[in-house]
Image (cartoon, rainbow, N blue to C red):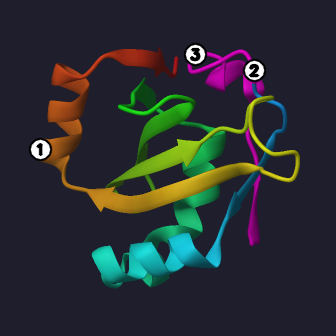
Amino acid sequence: MHYIGKLDRKIYKCITEDITTDEVIITDTQIQHIKERHPNYFERYFKHAEEVIKAPDYIIEANKPNTAFILKHIEDNGKNYEVILRLKTSEDPKDYKNSIITFLKVEEKRYNRYIRTKKILYKSE
């Protein structure tokens, strides 16, 4: 388990009011998943994961409960990122934390399609 940082519960309440911790982690299993499914993304881009979670541009409705589908454009490198973040609620085991399920770089066309076609729950100001 690797500590990533903290999230702002006020931002993520659009998913659920029942967020029981602000700590965000990623497990070794999920790191392996990212490395297998998206070669080189973890090494090249994962350093941006904390920024994506702390200051998302958009949170879009995910297809699973208590899950945030996060989109962020990073000005420094001109890239778009997607993070799927499972939020810990009172229904989850006590030792769970908010956990990154996946992280990837998203091409501009797909990023814009998500914004155009999906239900937006949060948009930064």
Reply above or below: 87 against 13: below
Residue 76 percent coordinates (x, y):
46, 58
Q: Residue at x 57, y 56 (%)?
A: 100
Q: Earlier in the sequence, mark 2 or mark 1?
A: 2
Q: Earlier in the sequence, mark 3 or mark 1?
A: 3
**Identity of the amino acid at label 1?**
Lys
**Stretch in magenta:** 1-18
Residue 2 percent coordinates (x, y):
74, 72
Q: Residue at x 19, y 54 (%)?
A: 107
Q: Is residue 13 magenta?
A: yes
The image's mark for residue 18 is 2
**Identity of the amino acid at label 2?**
Asp
- Where does label 1 land, which residue? 109
Q: State the separation of the CA atoms marked 2 and 1.
A: 34 Å
Q: Is residue 22 magenta?
A: no
- Residue closest to the eye, 93 or 106: 93
Residue 82 percent coordinates (x, y):
39, 49
- Where does label 3 land, which residue? 14
Q: Are marks 2 and 1 in contact (CB under 8 Å)?
A: no
Element marked by disc 2: loop
Q: Residues within 10 Å of mark 1 (few under 14, many from 20)?
A: few
Q: How many marks?
A: 3
Q: Residues within 10 Å of mark 2 (few under 14, many from 20)?
A: some
Q: Residue at x 88, y 45 (%)?
A: 94
Q: State the separation of the CA atoms marked 2 and 3.
A: 10 Å
Which tag is nearer the camera, tag 2 or tag 3? Answer: 2
| Residue 10 location, quadrant | top right
Q: Is residue 38 visible?
A: no
